[in-house]
Image: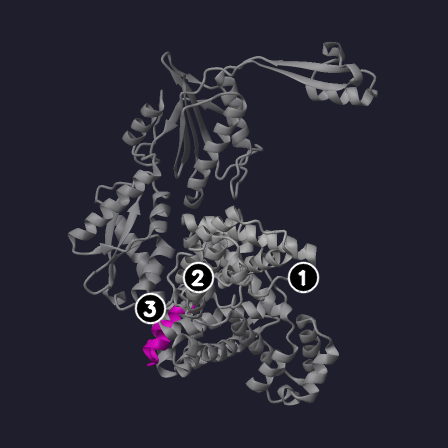
């Protein structure tokens, strides 16, 4: 069985596209081979800046012959039906068979026989199709041909190798004919050479100064860089993304370490790191004793006689210019932070639009500050510090450094807040309030940071809910799903006890107050907006405002506006937002191994807008269901609930009276009475103490007596008194178990 080797050799492929392109080549070719009837043992794809390569081992030499029988129309069907069938099969009418199918009449059948094909023919067809339909994010044409590729394609290497030797698979794509030859490093070994197998190919490439495997190049870069740094008592700042990118920029990595001019060592390490990474793809080298970035590592694609001295000199010259700009921005920003306490930046945000329906960044900051102050007591934060932190948290958005390096927002805010002499809690909140940005990002834990971070995200959510800009399908232009998950993690991981409905109410209130503070021309429109969004009549809104809350139109008062909302807010807006929170919570808990039906069973309970409480309940129920007693109890509960529901529907009454133990006729019945009393005595105080684990464990202990009861007792007894008592006993099972979670929501 032959092995296949393919190489597509071109001008430099952007580093960010290489890994995906190698995977796409592998999928396109291997899928095509399998669809054409060939099988293989394994396949591997590789990429360098100038080539994509694919090796396929133990490919079958030929595809098998295929005989397909296809049923067609009746022989007396209209001519057009027969014509369509003939087109689909590629046969003529005289090649069809006629078969009598009894009641179905005489029907045409086509026998299509496809002979086996040699692997070389199939490979040529599949590879040409892959090249012509390759899914590059961006591609280009060159010369007079029609072929599109990411950069001009120069060579196609395609060979099949078996015991007899290597065979070139013949194909031609826009004048580029396949061959068994490739080229080495552009500068160090530009000569072309022939190859006979993948092993021969990879060996000769390395001899020609090309490391084919991107992972091998990355490992070499990291090992050499860390070794050089260690030798000088330093360490490389780890950056996996940069390492992967640099490995895609070179075919023969040569690691060089250079110095940073003393002039720039006073810059924040993050500024140095970001500037060098973004502009020149340098790794930062840190002094572990001081935390300062003191050197850099660059990776060249060529070996030189002076061991890289000329390359380093050129890089250092460019780096000096780049860092001079950064130093200028830093010093200017520090002057504003220290001398004017960032006020010019805050004033400038009044002229920056956050959203055309939600006002400026300054108006948004005012809302976040009010929210943070409201939230502070619930997260054990000082309300005044929380407001102060929110007021300056986004000041750095106006700074020159953030204009140059937007990815440093928040971090620079901390530096500037410290320079302005603000409390440490305020400075930390400036950096941390954006977090968490993703599911693996750290969650702020300091109280002021938690308050500001929650306020920031709640304002975003309630604001966009207010203007009806919610996520739809896969579209989420304002990252509201991420903001919701951030809120959930902030609340749950910090054990915050703050009902989301109340939190949303405060957020909606602040958005409404922003509207009420506008001029009189827009006040009538605010009323209409409120009526539409809150699903109430405009007249009702006007009546409430003109009656009890008229002053809120001219001199807004927190109390007045909150009362206004409490009176006119239909549950649809806040309930819709709460449902959105619950949907994201399901995703969050699913990643923790908690089933969606378990979450539904807990969401159905009272207090479902207290996310910390909800998660504790779900975790406890999930653990209970993992036990044998817990899982089997659910079946007993469902049996009791189904029987009871059926009899209630049939009788038209609810069996909610307390069952009487003196009417019990069997030992199993009496045992269940005792077990329910015992369980209730444990569950009630446990639920009051929010000790869900104890409550669930007590509930699970009911499994045995409930099973025994159903085995021994006939519910629909001949005596109506006994029957009614037993149905009331089933209701007691439903009430006691249902007080822990809505077990009817559980599947299975």
Residue 531 vertical position relative to residue 281 in the rendered view, above or below: below
Name the residue tied to disc 3: 327
Residue 389 vertical position relative to residue 405 in the rendered view, above or below: below
Magenta stretch holds residue 690? no
Mark 1 element type:
loop
- Other-residue count near label 2 (Cα within 10 Å), few / some / many at <14 / 14–19 / ≥20: many
For the stretch drawn in magenta, the main secondary structure is helix
Query: Which residue is located at x 50 percent, y 51 percent?
Result: 709
Judging from the image, the colouring scheme is one colour
Evaluate whether residue 345 shows in this view: no
Nearest to viewer (mark 3 / mark 1): 1
Q: Position of residue 182 (x, y in %)?
A: 38, 27
Mark 2 element type:
helix
- Other-residue count near label 1 (Cα within 10 Å), few / some / many at <14 / 14–19 / ≥20: few
Q: Position of residue 90 (x, y in %)?
A: 69, 17
The reply to whether discs 3 and 1 touch (Cβ–Cβ < 8 Å) is no
- Name the residue nearer the viewer: 592 or 471: 592
Q: Earlier in the sequence, mark 1 or mark 2?
A: 1
Residue 483 vertical position relative to residue 25 in the rendered view, above or below: below
The reply to whether discs 3 and 2 touch (Cβ–Cβ < 8 Å) is no
- Name the residue nearer the viewer: 237 or 154: 237
- Residue 653 numbered mark, or none: 1
The residue stretch that appears in magenta: 413-436
- Residue 158 numbered mark, or none: none
- Residue 679 numbered mark, or none: 2
- Name the residue nearer the viewer: 294 or 394: 394
> Is residue 339 found left or right of 576 in the rendered image?
left
> Is residue 113 found left or right of 600 in the rendered image?
right
Q: Quadrant of residue 211?
A: top left
């Amino acid at each position: 069985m032959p092995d296949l080797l393919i190489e597509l050799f071109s001008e430099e492929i952007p580093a960010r596209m290489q890994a995906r392109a190698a995977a796409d080549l592998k999928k396109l070719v291997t899928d095509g081979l399998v669809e054409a009837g060939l099988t293989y043992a394994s396949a591997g794809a590789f990429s360098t800046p100038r080539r994509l390569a694919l090796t396929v081992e133990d490919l079958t030499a030929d595809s098998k012959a295929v005989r397909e029988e296809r049923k067609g129309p009746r022989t007396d069907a209209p001519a057009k039906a027969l014509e369509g069938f003939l087109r689909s099969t590629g046969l003529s009418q005289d090649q069809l068979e006629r078969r009598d199918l009894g009641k179905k009449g005489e029907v045409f059948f086509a026998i299509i026989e496809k002979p086996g094909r040699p692997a070389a023919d199939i490979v040529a067809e599949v590879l040409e199709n892959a090249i012509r339909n390759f899914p590059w994010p961006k591609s280009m044409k060159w010369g007079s041909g029609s072929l599109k590729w990411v950069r001009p394609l120069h060579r196609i290497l395609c060979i099949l190798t078996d015991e007899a030797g290597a065979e070139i698979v013949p194909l031609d794509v826009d004048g580029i004919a396949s061959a068994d030859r490739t080229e080495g490093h552009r500068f160090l070994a530009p000569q072309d050479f022939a190859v006979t197998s993948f092993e021969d190919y990879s060996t000769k490439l390395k001899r020609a100064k090309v490391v084919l495997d991107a992972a091998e190049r990355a490992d070499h870069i990291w090992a050499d860089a860390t070794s050089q740094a260690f030798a000088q008592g330093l360490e490389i700042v780890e950056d996996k993304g940069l390492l992967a990118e640099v490995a895609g920029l070179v075919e023969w990595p040569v690691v060089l370490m250079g110095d940073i001019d003393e002039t720039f060592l006073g810059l924040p390490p993050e500024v140095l790191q970001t500037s060098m990474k973004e502009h020149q793809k340098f790794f930062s080298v840190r002094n572990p004793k001081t935390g300062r970035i003191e050197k850099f590592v660059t990776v060249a694609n060529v070996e030189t006689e002076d061991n890289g001295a000329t390359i380093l000199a050129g890089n250092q010259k460019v780096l000096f210019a780049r860092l001079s700009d950064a130093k200028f921005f830093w010093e200017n920003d520090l002057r504003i932070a220290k001398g004017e306490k960032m006020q010019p930046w805050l004033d400038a945000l009044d002229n920056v639009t956050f959203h055309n329906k939600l006002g400026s960044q300054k108006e948004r900051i005012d809302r976040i500050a009010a929210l943070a102050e409201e939230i502070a007591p619930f997260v054990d934060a000082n309300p005044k510090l929380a407001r102060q932190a929110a007021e300056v948290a986004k000041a750095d958005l106006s700074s020159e450094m953030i204009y140059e390096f937007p990815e440093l927002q928040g971090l620079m805010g901390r530096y500037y807040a410290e320079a302005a002499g603000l409390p440490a809690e305020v400075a930390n909140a400036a950096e941390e309030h954006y977090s968490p940005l993703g599911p693996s990002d750290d969650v702020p834990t300091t109280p002021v940071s938690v308050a500001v971070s929650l306020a920031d995200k709640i304002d975003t959510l309630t604001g966009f809910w207010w203007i009806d800009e919610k996520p739809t399908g896969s579209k989420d232009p304002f990252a509201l799903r991420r903001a919701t998950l951030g809120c959930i993690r902030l609340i749950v991981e910090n054990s915050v006890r703050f009902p989301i409905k109340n939190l949303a109410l405060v957020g909606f209130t602040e958005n409404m107050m922003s509207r009420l503070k506008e001029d009189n021309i827009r006040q009538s429109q605010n009323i209409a907006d409120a009526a539409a969004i809150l699903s109430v009549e405009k007249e009702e809104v006007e009546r409430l405002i003109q009656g009890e809350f008229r002053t809120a139109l001219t001199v807004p008062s927190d109390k007045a506006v909150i009362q206004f909302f409490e009176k006119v807010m239909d549950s649809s807006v806040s309930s819709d937002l709460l449902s959105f929170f619950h949907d994201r919570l399901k995703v969050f808990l699913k990643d923790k191994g908690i089933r969606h039906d378990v979450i539904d069973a807990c969401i159905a309970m009272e207090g479902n807008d207290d996310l910390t409480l909800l998660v504790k309940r779900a975790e406890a129920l999930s653990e209970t269901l993992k036990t044998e007693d817990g899982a089997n109890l659910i079946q007993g509960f469902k049996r009791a609930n189904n029987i009871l529901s059926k009899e209630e529907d049939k009788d038209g009454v609810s069996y909610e009276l307390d069952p009487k133990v003196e009417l019990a006729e069997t030992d199993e019945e009496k045992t269940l009475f005792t077990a329910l009393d015992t369980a209730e005595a444990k569950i009630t105080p446990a639920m009051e103490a929010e000790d869900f684990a104890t409550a669930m464990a007590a509930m699970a202990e009911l499994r045995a007596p409930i099973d025994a009861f159903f085995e021994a007792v006939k519910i629909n007894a001949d005596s109506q008194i006994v029957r009614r008592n037993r149905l009331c006993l089933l209701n007691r099972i439903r009430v006691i178990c249902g007080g822990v979670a809505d077990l009817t929501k559980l599947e299975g």
